[in-house]
Amino acid sequence: MESKEIKEISQAVVSRLPRYYRYLGELKDEGVERISSQDLSRIMKVTASQIRQDFNNFGGFGQQGYGYNVELLYNEIAKILGLHSKHHLVLIGAGNLGQALANYVNFERRGFIIKGIFDQKEELVGREIRGIKVRRMEELESFIRENDIDIAVLTIPKTGAVAVADRLVRSGINAIWNFAHVDLNVPEGVQVENVHLSESLMKLSYNLNRYNLEKEL
Amino acid sequence: MESKEIKEISQAVVSRLPRYYRYLGELKDEGVERISSQDLSRIMKVTASQIRQDFNNFGGFGQQGYGYNVELLYNEIAKILGLHSKHHLVLIGAGNLGQALANYVNFERRGFIIKGIFDQKEELVGREIRGIKVRRMEELESFIRENDIDIAVLTIPKTGAVAVADRLVRSGINAIWNFAHVDLNVPEGVQVENVHLSESLMKLSYNLNRYNLEKEL
DNA sequence: TAGATTGTTAATCGATTAACAATC
DNA sequence: TAGATTGTTAATCGATTAACAATC
């Protein structure tokens, strides 16, 4: 069921793919060879219908009467998520969060390789984080061009973030993983994935509060 | 327009609240006194209709012919998000990410106060992170009970996360901010907010790839 | 072949947007 | 009062779930 046309996939579906990938990886590691949408639905606590709909956005990976081959499906999702090709990253902001991400080994395992780290602070420049030298911000543009960089990770305070994002875009970056608490304004075609930690914490706070209110009634 | 009944609010709405809060805070800091849903919609790039619908879930904060008072709305959303009451946190896992979060001053400013830090690693125990002593995991339960802890932040590898979450629940924690790459299984009423960084990165990777594919056609 | 389970169409549910009467 | 803009109802759109024919 190959098709040349690229169907528009909703972000709701995309958001679920990594979770499928995680569960299928675990099943694979446990040596499970095949699984039906119903069994998977029980494990993952979603409907079997949704699972089948989701997978079928990308073509038919299953087989009637059999289910899905775990390893095949796992690999297909990896391909869909772009995990079969290597990505070169730069990390901008070598503060606590930047260092935490740089030290996160699993990214590298998945093909996300940090090539360069940048920071404004003169005292950080020249230091090494997991073997990667921290560079001056001035080198940013040339480094991106010379090292075939795919993705920029923004872990700087929001004050500088918008300006840096502009520089990134001008240097040809087309994916930004943004940890700064601002909305970046990028031209269409440049992908931004926001991780707004404080917003996530506020959501938790809301739900905690709300539940306590409900209990009182 | 006060109402005793607690209307069920969808998580879609809840997810948008922190962003409103951020924009209103900025407007407030700029000295803007009032704003209409239409003006806000232009700034935030959402529809005015959605803004009005969202706010009206919680009561009428605006005024016909005038719009919304920025400061009032800002404070109301803070209340809704539970930012007017203090929250006591424990941080479990004093690795890179845990330290990054502990050093993130803005949480404290918003009323999220880290009271205790815990780690399994003997060599970390006794150290201080931003003035907070790292404790042994054995102390976890008693510390939670004695220090009126609200929220637990889980920044440990996924291997231990499920077991620790169980201990947290048994100690009466009812909100977990989970950075471990597992789905926690908690009883109803315990709130979990997941921050799955690798899943976020995969989503970015997907969108990057997909865009590149589309370009090729 | 009979049983199982997918792929896919149709039905339902929920969220977003549009429209407009109410009202400041 | 007239103009502006909310609060809210109605219409639309999209996502999820259910159902079932196709098929391994």
Image: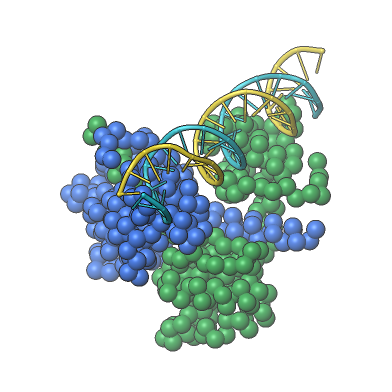
Chain colours: A green, B blue, C yellow, D cyan
Q: Residue at x 57, y 70 (%)?
A: A152
> Where is residue A217 drawn, in percent x and y?
24, 31
Q: Residue at x 45, y 60 (%)?
A: B39
The answer to whether residue B76 is seen in the rendering is yes
Quick check: A206 left or right of B158?
left
Quick check: B55 left or right of D20?
left
Outermost residue toward the left in this view: B146
Q: Residue at x 47, y 70 (%)?
A: A155
Quick check: A200 left or right of C4?
left
The correct choice, above or below, for B67 with respect to A103 in the image is above
> Where is residue A106 drawn, in percent x and y?
55, 60
Q: Residue at x 64, y 40 (%)?
A: A54
Q: Give residue C22's quadrant in the image.
A: top left
Residue in the foreground of this view, choosing between A150 and B207: B207
> Where is residue A124 drawn, in percent x and y?
44, 83
The correct choice, above or below, for A185 with respect to B205 in the image is below
- Counting every numbered tag in the picture gives 0
Q: Give residue B88's quadrant in the image.
A: bottom left
> Where is residue A128 drawn, in percent x and y?
49, 79
The answer to whether residue A208 is seen in the rendering is no
- What is the quadrant of the N terminus of chain A in the image? top right
Residue in the foreground of this view, choosing between B184 and B4: B4
The correct choice, above or below, for B202 with respect to A10 in the image is below
Residue in the foreground of this view, choosing between B139 and D7: D7
